[in-house]
Image: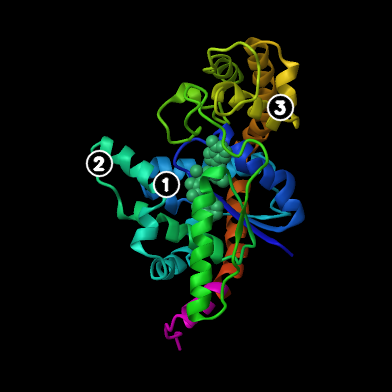
Amino acid sequence: MTRVFSGIKPTGHLTLGNYLGAMRQWAAVDQHRADAVFCVVDLHGMTVDHDPARLRRLTRQAATLLLAAGLDPELCTVFVQSHVDEHTRLSYVMECVATDGEMRRMIQYKEKVAGEGARGRGVRLSLLTYPALMAADILAYGADEVPVGDDQSQHVELTRDLAVRFNQRYGHTFVVPKATVPAVAARVMNLQDPGSKMGKSDDSGPGIVYLLDEPDVIRKKVMRAVTDSGREVVYDREERPGVANLLEILAACTGGNPESLASVHDSYGALKQATAEAVLETLRPVQARHRELCADPGYVEEVLRHGAEKARAIARPIVDTAYRAVGLLPPG
Ligand code: TYM
């Protein structure tokens, strides 16, 4: 059976981008067709300045939202990265396979270094080695496929390179995974700045729809989205990025396609109205389920405990094999 692995980082409140680009596919498709493993990658949340209490809170909230989005612990495995030691065990090995140059070429590293530098903070070494940990996350599970939004493709490519290199040097150990990216909404853009991705750690709140935003806040954010100077609703990512973003969001929420939806709406106002309603409809059940789950924190804890056990059982033998392959002496 195909094994799928993916993760989400608790560095901020989860967004519509996370949902449309990743979580929704995990729940609607991946958990039904594959042996699927999903992880809240809390260790990755420590690669930039972080507050311990907030990290803990956001980790619990992300796990709760994964379940609210429809991940079913009967069908898939949901767990927290730091509960399974195999991630850090293998991460070190991947650091010994990757090169410094490869890490420095990662677009997200360059972007984040610029951001941290501008805030006058030192850049954590773990920000540089982040892709080695991400490769470990994926390779420890023998994942064939990694369903992600477009922004993670480069990291998955690097994971493939590292898996191939490891297998050539030390003998076949790892499955070489591939990224799967959704056909629409693979890169949801910031509503106030359609040139940049809608990211959960960004500071520009008005351009980001958070999964737990109140309905009237969501409506306002969509209605105030930056569009373009034209009037006609056309789908053109290059020339009309703001309108194209709304059309993609609408398409992802309604199951249509952006080109044909463009011809249905004759003004930007109508398009925004329809998009706001579609987003609200899409998020309503997630928010309702989230409220229910918050009333039963013991359930979420139990899911995560059991998830970590299942995850460990998959990852341990694979990481043990990798340790032996590189020449580490097994404990007696
Ligand atoms: P993260 O936490 O930034 O995002 C989680 C998932 O959401 C997708 N995504 C988006 N998709 C479309 N439009 C957007 N605006 C948008 N923003 C986020 C991301 O592509 C991702 O699929 N490095 C990863 C976490 C990670 C991981 C892994 C993923 C760690 N280890 C192993 C897969 C496999 C990250 O920061 O995702």
The reply to whether callout 2 and callout 1 are in contact (CB within 8 Å) is: no
- Look at mark 1 in the image and give the residue it sits on: 107
Q: Using the numbered discs, state the Cα–Cα distance from disc 3 to disc 1 in whole angstroms.
A: 30 Å
Crowd around label 3: few <14 · some 14–19 · many ≥20 (10 Å): some
> Which segment is the magenta one?
318-332
Q: Residue at x 54, y 50 (%)?
A: 153
Residue 189 versus residue 77: which sits nearer the camera?
Answer: 189
What is the C-alpha distance between the residues marked 3 and 2? 44 Å
**The magenta stretch spans residue 39:** no
| Few, some or many residues within 10 Å of mark 1 (<14, 14–19, 20+) | some
Q: Which residue is mark 3?
A: 259
Q: CA distance from mark 2 to mark 1?
A: 19 Å
Q: Earlier in the sequence, mark 2 or mark 1?
A: 1
Residue denoted by label 2 = 121
Q: The disc labelled 2 sits on which kind of residue?
A: Arg
Query: Of marks 3 and 2, which one's residue comes earlier in the chain?
Result: 2
Quarter of the figure that contains the N terminus: bottom right
